[in-house]
Amino acid sequence: MARSNQIAILKDVDLRPDMASIDGDRAVIEQTATYVKGLWSQMKTAEVYIAAGREFKNAHDHLSKNSRHDRNRIGWVKAFGKAENKFDCGRTTAEKYIAIFEGFFHVANMEIAAILWRAICSCQSQAKH
């Protein structure tokens, strides 16, 4: 009988943080940072930039405050401050990856995205010369 009471009590316990709180924001930061840090070691290809941009976009959408006076959330800008930053990059770099993702996210095949990325890079390098 005591065992069934313990199980019933455990069913009522929610071990996940409230995602609309500072603890939830920290969980998103940690999860995104872990994923993105794994990408940095890979070759710098279009797929990596797009994948990092997707993760940063998801984090940005989650970390956005309801207003500038919202004290219950960390916020996108503060997530890149000294106290919270775990991404190994700055906010502007993350926003550049988001822009790359938004430019290519509609491309279903990553190989096509890579070809498009190389074409853009080659056009930019030719324009510099």
Image (cartoon, helix red, strand yellow):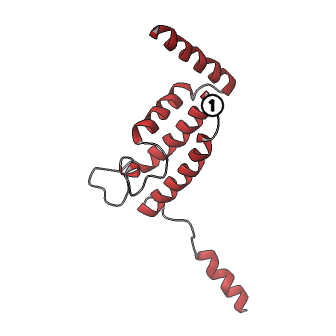
Instruction: Give percent across and percent down for residue 115.
Output: 64, 18
Asked whether the viewer can see residue 109, the reply is no
Quarter of the image containing the N terminus? bottom right
Which amino acid type corresponds to the residue marked 1 in the rendered image? Glu
Residue 112 location (% of width, % of height):
66, 21
Image height of 30 relative to 99, above or below? below
Label 1 neighbourhood size at 10 Å, few (<14), some (14-19), many (20+)? many
- Number of labelled discs? 1
48 over 116 or under it: above or below: below
Q: Is residue 48 left or right of residue 66?
A: right
Residue 76 shows up from this direction: yes
Q: Measured from the top left, where is residue 57 in percent x and y?
A: 49, 40
Q: Quadrant of residue 92?
A: top left
On the image, which quarter does residue 128 sit in?
top left
Which residue is disc 1 drawn over? 47
Check disc 1 and report its element: helix, strand or loop: helix
Q: Residue at x 60, y 18 (%)?
A: 118
In the rendered image, the residue lying farthest to the left is 69
Q: Nearer the viewer, residue 27 or 72?
A: 27
The extreme bottom residue here reads: 1
At 53% across and 50% down in the image, what residue appears? Answer: 33
